[in-house]
Amino acid sequence: MSQKKGSTREAEKARSLSRVIGVTGFLALGLGLFFTVRLFLTGKPVEIKTNGEAPPYRRVETRPVLPSSLFTGAVAEAYQAAHDMPDFIDQFYCYCQCKEYHGHKTLLTCFTDKHAANCDICLYQALTAVQMSKEGKSADAIRHFFSSRFAQ
């Protein structure tokens, strides 16, 4: 009879554990359904509050930009812009396709070596991005401009 009591206790523990797992799964499913329905109805995902500030941009290219003093004219101006606004310049794809052919990460990568000094596309993009930013254009608007400008 003691074996029967032991097996009954084991069965009760198994049923209890099964209930806990079932309730947890049900709650997870409910939360997932809630967020899915909210996204469907509003067209917007649930936003995380950040005191009204946009989350900080996390740079992809972390190497330093070469000093603009190594160059002259528009090349020096572009290198200085990349030095002054690295988080901004880092947000753009470089349309000279150096990512595909040289392993560059972003437009900012072009300014971590002498690549941009010899590439009219890199220089054009950096100087144009800075000018458009000064005119109040967002990074998204500038990306759209570049993609339409360089569309093939």
Image: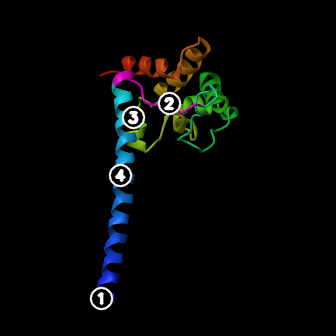
Dot 1 or dot 4: first in sequence order is 1
In-front residue for pair 127/139: 139
Q: Residue at label 4?
A: 25
Say above or below: 20 vs 88: below
Does 37 sit left or right of 129 as displayed? left
Does 143 sit left or right of 25 as displayed? right
Q: Residues within 10 Å of mark 4 (few under 14, many from 20)?
A: few
Image quarter of residue 147: top left
Image quarter of residue 58: top right
Residue at mark 1 to residue at mark 4: CA–CA distance: 36 Å
Badge 2 amino acid: Glu
- Observer-side mark, 1 or 4, equals 1
Q: Residue at label 2?
A: 47
Say above or below: 108 vs 148: below
Q: Residues within 10 Å of mark 2 (few under 14, many from 20)?
A: few
Badge 4 amino acid: Gly
Any magenta on residue 61?
no
Residue at mark 4 to residue at mark 3: CA–CA distance: 16 Å
Q: Residue at label 1?
A: 1
Q: Quadrant of the N terminus?
A: bottom left
**Mark number, residue 119:** none
Q: Main secondary structure of the magenta part?
A: loop
- Give residue 44's position: percent from left, percent from top: 41, 25
Q: Which residues are magenta?
A: 41-49
Q: Residue at label 3?
A: 35
